[in-house]
Amino acid sequence: MSSMLYTFSLSWVCASLLAATLSLLFFLRWTAAKKPGQLPTPPRLPIIGNLHQLGSLSHHSLARLSEKYGPVMLFNFGRIPTVVVSSAAGAQEALKIRDLAFSGRPLSSISDRIFYGSQDLAFAQYGDEWRQMRRVCVMHLLSPKQVRSFRSVREEEVARLVDCIRAASGAAVNMSAMIIGLTCDIVCKVAFGSKYSEEGGSQIHSLMSELSAVMGMFPMRDHIPWLGWIDWLNGMDGRVKKIAMTIDSFIEKVLEEHTSKRCDNNNDKEGSGMDYLVDILMSLGDKEDLDVISLGRDSIKAIILDMFAAGTETTYVATEWAMAELMKHPAEMKRAQEETVEDTQLLGYHVPQGTTLFINAWALGRDVGSWEKPEEFRPESQ
C-alpha cells in the first residue's frame, strides 16, 4: 500500500513540476519584449499553433483577427509559419514590390498527388523550369493570337445559350446550370477540340467542383506530420486518391485520342484551323529545343489540368454572381447597358452620351508608360 502511495505521489510531483515549468516557459516567452519590426501574432498553443482560431470560414476569421492585430500578422498553422496579409497595400508590396522574395510555393501533399508531383504552373517551385513553363503558357497557350483564334468557339456557345433561354418562352430556367454548361463546353472545346458534353458534361462539372473542394482541405500531415494518420481516418486520403485517379483517367483518355489522330494524320479541327491546347502541348513535348522546357507526359497533363481548373469554376462562379447581382439591382443593370448616360470628358477628349466604354486590360499590362520592357518577364522590376 505504501509503495502505491509513493508511486502516486512521485507521479503527481513530476506532473506538477512539468506543468509549472511549461507555464513558466510560456509566461517568459509571451511577456518578453518584442524585437523591432517583429510581426504581430495572436497567442498560439503548443503543437497546433493558431489553428484553434480558425473557424469553418477561415478567411472571415482571419479578417476579424486582422482588425485587432493589423493588416500583416504572423500565424502558425502547426509547424508552418504563415504571414497573413489583409490589406491592398500589403498585397501590392508582397506581390509586386517584393515578389521575388515571396516567389516560393508552399509544399502540399494534395497538389503533389493531383497535379503529378506539382509539375504544373500553379504549384511548381520557382526556378528556371517554372519560368520556362510560364513562357510556354504565355507564348503558346494564352497569347493574344491564340485567344483570338477561339473567338468563334465563344460566340457559338454563347449564341447556343441565348437560343436555349429564348426557347423557354418565358418559363423559369436554371441559369446556374446553363452558365456552368456554357463554361465547361467552351473550355473543353478550346482545350480538347470537343465539348464532351454528350458523354459526361455534368461529370466534368462535378470533377471540377470536387477538385475545388479537395484543394481547400487542410491536410494534417503537411502541418503536424506525426498526426498525418488523421488524414486517412477522416477519409481525406481516400477522397484525394479518388479524384486524382478520375482526373488522370479523363485526361489520359483525351491524350490517347489526340495521339491516335496525330498518328493517323487526321486533323480533326472542323475546318477551323485552330490549334487546341492539348495539341500545342503535345507538339512542344515532341520538340528537342534547348530554349523550351522538355514537357513529359505528366507535365502536359498537369498544365492541361491547370488551364481547365482555372478556366471553369472561377469563370462560371463570377458570371453567376455578376448576373445575380445585376438582376437584384436593376438600376445598375440599366447603367451597365447604357454605359455613358451623358456627355463627359476623358483625358481631355470629349466622349458623347451613349458611347460604350471598354477597358483594354491587355494593353494596360503592356503600357510602356507604366512598365519598363513590358513584354519581358522581369520579376525583379518594381
Image (tube, rainbow, N blue to C red):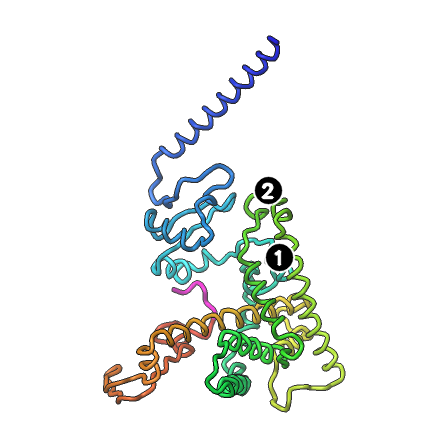
Task: Name the disc covering residue 238, or none.
Answer: none
Q: Is residue 113 left or right of residue 353?
A: right
Q: Position of residue 279 (x, y in %)?
A: 65, 78
Quadrant the N terminus occupies: top right
Residue type, label 2 = Leu
Q: Position of residue 40 (x, y in %)?
A: 36, 45
Above or below, comparing residue 265 to residue 99 in the picture: below
Q: Position of residue 188 (x, y in %)?
A: 60, 77
Give the labeled residue for mark 2. 227
Label 2 crowd bin: few (<14), some (14–19), many (20+), radius 10 Å: few
Question: Is any part of residue 172 visible from this angle?
Answer: yes
Above or below, comparing residue 215 to residue 357 in the picture: above
Label 1 crowd bin: few (<14), some (14–19), many (20+), radius 10 Å: some
Q: Position of residue 268 (x, y in %)?
A: 68, 86
Between 309 and 328, which is closer to the camera in this rendering? 328
Give the labeled residue for mark 1. 112
Residue type, label 1 = Asp
